[in-house]
Image: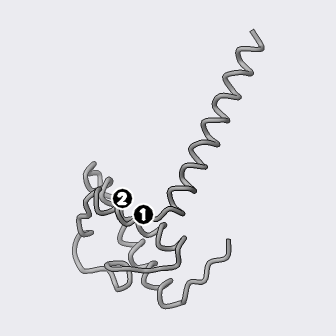
């Protein structure tokens, strides 16, 4: 897949991602960070950048995003990709179990 991301958006995303890379040992912060990362990945896959990711990250902590808002932003393309990945991991796991059962 060839991504057509302009330099400006690439720069903005790098600042957003840098803010998400902070090391904080707080479970709720990590969940929030992961929701932001999923939204950013979805926008990269679709080459469409919406607020708040189309401008520089605000000063201070990462803004809180609710799970329902993050899910509502996700596109079909992201869901298809993640479903395929989960299915392939599931198939690999089943194949491994079958090999162990056959070796007994």
Q: Nearer the viewer, residue 17 or 69?
A: 69
The answer to whether marks 2 and 1 mark residues whose Cβ atoms lie closer than 8 Å is yes
Q: Total of numbered circles in the picture?
A: 2
> Label 2 belongs to which residue?
71
Which residue is pictured at 50% across the width and 83% down the height?
10
Which residue is pictured at 74% across the width and 8% down the height?
104
Q: Quadrant of residue 71?
A: bottom left
Local secondary structure at mark 2: helix
Compared with residue 104, is residue 73 higher up or lower down, i.e. above or below? below
Residue 59 at x, y percent in the picture: 24, 80
Question: Image check: 97 left or right of 11?
Answer: right
Q: Nearer the viewer, residue 53 or 78?
A: 78
Compared with residue 86, is residue 56 higher up or lower down, i.e. above or below? below
Compared with residue 10, is residue 68 higher up or lower down, i.e. above or below? above
Residue 39 at x, y percent in the picture: 41, 66
Local secondary structure at mark 1: loop
Residue 57 at x, y percent in the picture: 32, 80
> Label 1 belongs to which residue?
74
- Between the residue at mark 2 and the residue at mark 1, the CA separation in whole angstroms equals 5 Å
């Amino acid at each position: 897949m060839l991504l057509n991301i302009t330099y400006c958006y690439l720069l903005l995303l790098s600042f957003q991602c840098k803010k998400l890379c902070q090391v904080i040992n707080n479970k709720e912060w990590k969940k929030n960070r992961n929701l932001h990362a999923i939204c950013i990945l979805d926008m990269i896959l679709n080459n469409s950048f919406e607020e708040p990711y189309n401008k520089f990250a605000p000063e201070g902590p990462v803004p809180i995003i609710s799970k329902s808002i993050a899910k509502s932003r996700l596109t079909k393309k992201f869901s298809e990709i993640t479903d395929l990945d989960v299915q392939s991991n599931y198939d690999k796991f089943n194949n491994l179990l079958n090999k162990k059962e056959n070796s007994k």
